[in-house]
Amino acid sequence: MPVILWFLVAVPLVAGASLLVAGHAADRVAALLGVTVAAVTGVLAIVAAVTRPAVSVPLLAGMPAGLAVDGLSAVLVVTVAAVLIAVLVFAAGEFGSARFHGLMLVFAAAMLVTVTARDLVVLLMAWEVMGACSYALIGFHWRERRPAVSGAVAFLTTRAADLGMYFAAGAALAGGVGGLSLAGLPGAAGGWRDAIAAGLVLAAVGKSAQLPFSFWLSRAMDGPSPVSALLHSATMVAAGAYLLLRIEPLLAATGWAATVVAWAGAITALALGAVAVAQRDLKQVLAASTCSQIGFMVLAAGVSGVAAGTGQLVAHAATKSLLFLVAGAWLIALDTRDLERLRGAARRFPFLGTVFTIGALALAGVPPLSIWVTKDAVLTAALADSPALYAVGLAAALVSGAYVGRVLAILWLPAEPGPGRPLSALLLGPLPVLAAAAALLGLGGLPGPRRSFEGLVGSAEPASGWAELLVSGVIAIAGVLAAAAWTRSRSLAGTAVLAGWFGLEGFARRFVAVPALRFGTALARFDDRVVDGGVRAAAATGAALGRLADTRIEWSVDGVVRGVARATAALGRLASRPQTGRLHQYYAQAAVGLGVLAILLIILNVR
């Protein structure tokens, strides 16, 4: 049923675009329409996952545009649609703006195209729309300087990495990849295959906020919490990891790309986990932890653990969307994200505290919650590839427990009751569902469901043994307990380098942005003074030569013409004088003429 796939993309796209065009006139119905469209999209996603439709339309000569739902994308379309429903239900309790809901729906449509794209042309189109919507959503409160600037920082950083996808598309075209299909990339000719891999790895690492691009996700936290719950859990940030999982055959074919990707993910998982431990802002903790958890997915792509990475992606989507929404609820109720001011928030709001704790423990990989199983599957795949990668992954798992234990200790500390804003049922409604998903999705890692899941995504991988599960579970619990005990007895002071995300934004500003601006300024000056100046000088020279020609040549020629005309006129006047009409005067003139002629003849004969 190919029409299902068209509707899956068209329904949120058309509804979102309509809301954006209608503007404030649609504010009163925007929330209801957004939730309704999200629900319809969810139904269509389930139907598409079951029926596996595929469509293709001619775009350019020899280059069709194709969408298809296979096992891997079936998991993702359902995940994206489910998180979209939960986030828009939550947002309906706080945001009634047609612009907000319109942007969210258009973004979701672009993400659905991203996960179903079968060629680089369609992927590029969706990638661009996704990036533009993320810029508008992060800077949603554009009248405030900080969100507006943060949106620009996030957009420009990811756009710089996105150039890699354009480079990859050009390399694929040169390498003879038919229709630029993703499946045909490993067969690219010669060194073009390596160029394609390099470009796509750059684009994916940038979009997934892996080192050294991680800092843009910190700035993205200035957007509304529902935006973070959608973009930075199951969609935009996960899109880079999904792309790497999708092109795993290309990574493996190059030899070097898989190793680079695996180590990039492992190092990011460890380093950004340490950054999360040092944060004083709850959303910054969640942002850094997102980079870290996405690192496990990237690691999985590098060690051919497609099923493990996909499972991690799904479990993380449910868990992190839950945590971002609870952080948004506390922001609404208490008007703060600062951990110092959130002391005891879980006691003051027991429901929020409970669901947040479930999600946080799942994020840490505490047994028997979901990420315990999915993260261990990634570690098992890493162990089969490299013991060193496995060791770094275990260290990252320990750090995951540390930042979760620190946050939970703060939130559950005894605190004096204080004023708080009541929360609507719409805000609270999606949270138990997401908490249940965060707790139970790990069941897919049990032996029976795991094999079915591997068959779904088309990847057979080594199964985790009880020893590996026990090791990762004990490490996660140890990290949580140790960090909680440490936090209860000490202040929130952290390392400045870690709290500042390794100074990555300052480094990028100083060594990338500023030189680029200076180079651009120098080019502009060269254009103004040399190129444009040369054009102006050529024009001025031509004008001067024209004036000179007009002065020296045109005037002289014109003067000669006028002189000839005056002489001719004078001769005409002289010639007209003898014409009197009197016969005796004509005879006299003839006699004079004959006399002159006779004199001339005499003179000539004498000589």
Image: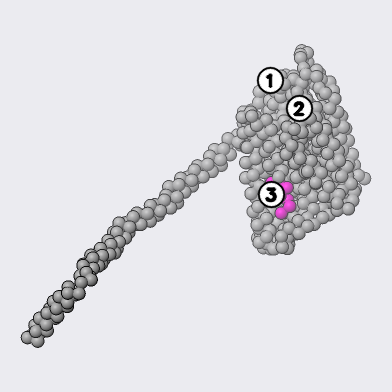
**How many circles with numbers are drawn on the protein?**
3
Q: Secondary structure at mark 2?
A: helix
Determine which quarter of the picture holds residue 65.
Answer: bottom right
Residue labelled with disc 2: 328
Q: Position of residue 427 (x, y in %)?
A: 82, 27
- For marks 3 and 1, give the CA distance: 40 Å
Where does the magenta region start and end?
Answer: 121-128
Is 589 drawn above or below residue 381 in the view shown?
below
Checking the image for residue 491, the label placed there is 1
Amino acid type for the residue under numbered disc 1: Ser
Q: Residue furthest bottom?
A: 605
Is residue 33 in view from this perspective? Answer: yes
Q: Earlier in the sequence, mark 3 or mark 2?
A: 3
Please name the residue that numbered disc 3 is placed on.
Answer: 201
User: Which residue occupies the foreground of this view, 216 or 369?
Assistant: 216
Q: Amino acid at mark 2?
A: Gly
- In terms of secondary structure, where does tag 3 sit? helix
Mark 1 element type: loop
Answer whether residue 276 is magenta in the image.
Answer: no
* Colour convention: one colour
Q: Identify the residue shown where x is 68% and y is 28%.
A: 278
Q: Quadrant of residue 360?
A: top right
Q: Residues within 10 Å of mark 2 (few under 14, many from 20)?
A: many
In the image, 176: left or right of 586?
A: right
